[in-house]
Image (cartoon, rainbow, N blue to C red):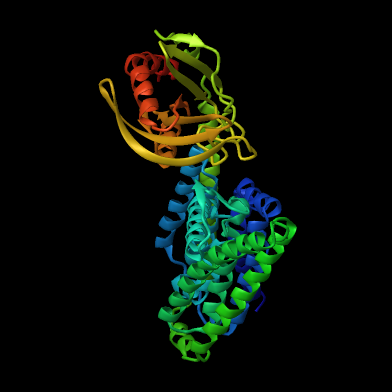
Amino acid sequence: MTNKGSSYYWTGIAIGAALLAPFLAYFETVQSIVSIWNSSETFAHGYIILPITLWLIWKRKNVILKINPQPCWLAILGLAACGFGWLLAELADVQVVRQYMFVMMIPFIVIVVLGWRMAWAMAFPLFYLLLAVPFGEIFLTPLVNFTADFTVSALQLTGIPVLREGSTFSIPSGNWSVVEACSGLRYLISSFTLGCLYAYLTYNSAKRRLIFILFSIVTPIIANGLRAYMIVMIGHYSGMTMAVGFDHLIYGWLFFGLVMFFMFWIGSFWRESPDTSPDSAKLAAQAIAPNSTILKAAASAILCISLWPVYAAYINSEAVNSTDVKLAQFKSDWQEVPEFVSWKLGFLPAYVEVNQSYRSNSTLVGMHLGYYRNQTRSSSLINSVNQLVKRAATDWHETDSSLRTETLGPRIIKIKESKLKGPGHSILVWQWYWVDGKYMANSYQGKFWQAKQKLLMQGDDGAVLIFYAPYEVNPEKARTAMRAFLSTNLPGLESKLALSKKQF
């Protein structure tokens, strides 16, 4: 009796250690999640995800406790894949992927140590843990654009004339701008988080759950457009005395609360009775794994998740580059002139930066080169913080952006083209990255090649190339100017970039 009780005791300790191990091995990743919860009201709901998950598991304890643990060794491959994904994200400094890989380790640990059947019995609670990851800022720009489109269209249907430029628009009573706080991202994340929980607790069929979850996504997006339209209308008819300050936010949350009430009320019409099918009896008909097998599975899981942070630390210690950066030696055949615009780039500081303006006859072109090396979170090439216009800027704003392909000398390059408007100036901006000796406009591609470089111990060198030219009405004039500058100067820049990168 004593030996059996002691065996169960150590088995419980091993299972607990395996589940806690990721929190210790990836403590910095855990800190990054909690830091965002603390700093952003949009993701403050993350604090309640783990308690809800534990409560949901407790609700199913009668089913779970009837299932015999049966470790699944094949799931070690999934756990290793999460670890490798975390490693790549660490090398490329993609925070959200690091966080998702960390959270995904927990379900795989459950599968490895306790088996598929027990994991399936708590599948939704384990899935719900993913909502603790602060993800969604990638949708800010699309949501801002949709809200602006919806509001402007609604105003025009109402008969109010609108003059729009980007996410800013003017009506006869005043000027309005759809900023990030107006995007409805908070409403969307809150609605989706509550909608998933409501669907799980209210319905049994996967079809009804999926339909309601989709409903919880579409509803806040449409509702936010209506909210923005109504706020503009309140401001318009009140002579810009109402809904233009703090009451703007109050109206928004009151409206959101009303929308959530009606969403759940509508969903209640299709409520299903709790599932009382005897699945536990089927699940119980399974061999009992020896405690020694569970101990080995827990130890294997702990070892698997511990390898990746150690390897990442080793790679980072070997990736330091000290080769001279040659960009400052670049000389153009165009005449150097003082800066011709007041625009300031909103990028994190680079290892070496070159900011210069050039003239050829009456043609003006500006250039910013940022060379990044030994990157940190306060100095990285591809980062969500890096914006053409600083977030706090009030004098400059981006009115449009798109991807295009340009033939520059012998090269065909994919670039990101943006239109910026400032006080008395409009400029066209071309931007792309140089990573691992390749040009690209897509930041995801840049992160991939950055991770590949570091994984192969080739450093993390990369650069952003930004060129801009003024225009008045037709941006083609600016394109012609930049094509002329780059056709003769890009080869020289390429040679300096190649010489700057560490040779292996």
The x and y percentages for residue 257 are 65, 72
The quarter in which the C terminus is drawn is top left
Q: Residue at x 40, y 36 (%)?
A: 416
- Number of marks present in the image shown: 0
In the figure, residue 391 lies in which quadrant?
top right
Percent of width and height locating residue 367: 47, 21
Q: Is residue 250 left or right of residue 273?
A: right
At a point 40% along the width and 79% down the height, the residue shown is 207
Picture quarter containing residue 58? Answer: bottom right
Figure check: 50 above or below 273: above
In this rendering, does residue 114 appear at all?
A: no
Say if residue 338 shows up in the picture: yes
- Between 27 and 354, the one lying in front of the other is 354
Percent across and percent down for residue 291 are 54, 70
Residue 276 is situated, as x and y percent measured from the top left of the image, at 50, 91
Position of the N terminus, as image quadrant, is: bottom right
Is 463 drawn above or below residue 142 in the view shown?
above
Residue beneath the point at 57% across and 58% down:
185
